[in-house]
Amino acid sequence: MYNSKTPSLADLPSSRQLLRSTVIAAIVAAALLVAVVLPAEYGKDLTGMGRVLGLTEMGEIKTALAREAAADAAASARQREQPVASAPVASSQPVTASAAPPVVAQAPVPASVPGWRDELGFTLAPGQGIEIKLVMKEGEKARYAWKVEGGVVNYDTHGDGSGRSISYVKGRGLAADEGELVAAFTGNHGWFWRNRGKEDVRLVLRTAGQYSELKRPM
């Protein structure tokens, strides 16, 4: 056992000293909040130090990404699943955005490029989005490739069904993507694209593999 010396009352800080330390700590915390946290997290630079340290730009990027994710999530939540016509003929349906013109998309047809099963093309006006889903069973695999003409898009590859949902990957400002989509559970798995540019863009999606249906939710 080690014996430690019990401090005397004279060695202990006084109430005034404790109060002073508390006030100083509170002032330092407030200064860090205003000069560092607000610029870095929310893009609000009240003192100008955030801009000097490069923190304000970081916060503005985070805020913009958060708004973008919220807008895309809200758009996806409002949409309802509806099968796309399977006949190899052209059709058009309005999609998304209240004030923007409708998205015109052709019905899925056998792909013109060898090795692909279906091909779907559509035009997105500025601010418009569209969602395409593959009906898949758990563990099934589908190949895909999409390409944008005339600009770039933001996208979210995700799935839902049987009370479950999943986000596989998200991207911003891309002109093309390709790969393999593996269904995490039985349900609908696919993509949501949005045109955040100032000009119309044309997007072509090609798919192949294990899926029973290609769907375009409303």
Image: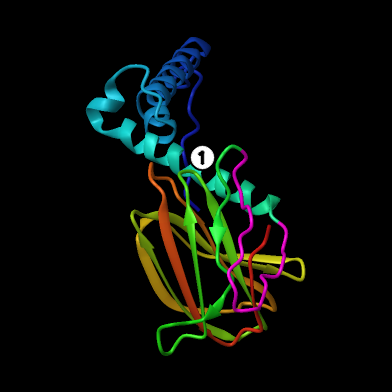
Q: Residue at x 27, y 26 (%)?
A: 51
| Image: 163 above or below 94 | below
In the image, 23 versus 158, the foreground residue is 158
What amino acid type is highlighted by mark number 1?
Arg
Determine whether, in the image, residue 114 is placed left or right of residue 71: left
- Location of residue 203 with respect to 110 vertically, above or below: above
Asked if residue 85 is positioned above or below residue 23 in the image, the reply reads: below
Residue shown at 46%/19% (left/top)?
Answer: 26
Seen as rendered, the residue at the extreme top is 16
Q: Secondary structure at mark 1?
A: helix
Residue 153 rendering spot, x and y as whole percentages: 41, 54
First to last magenta residue range: 80-98
Residue at x 37% of width, y 29% of height: 39
Tell whether 168 sits left or right of 214.
left
Q: In this figure, which residue is indicated by the disc labeled 1?
A: 67
Task: Based on the picture, tell me whether residue 201 belongs to the magenta stretch.
Answer: no
Q: To which quarter of the image does residue 133 belong?
A: bottom right
Task: Please tell me which residue is depicted at 35% across the width and 23% down the height of the picture.
Answer: 35
- For residue 60, above or below residue 89: above
**Could you tell me which quadrant the C terminus lies in?**
bottom right
The number of numbered badges drawn on the structure is: 1
The image shows residue 176 at horizontal and vertical percentages of 36, 66
Q: Tell me the colour scheme of the image.
A: rainbow
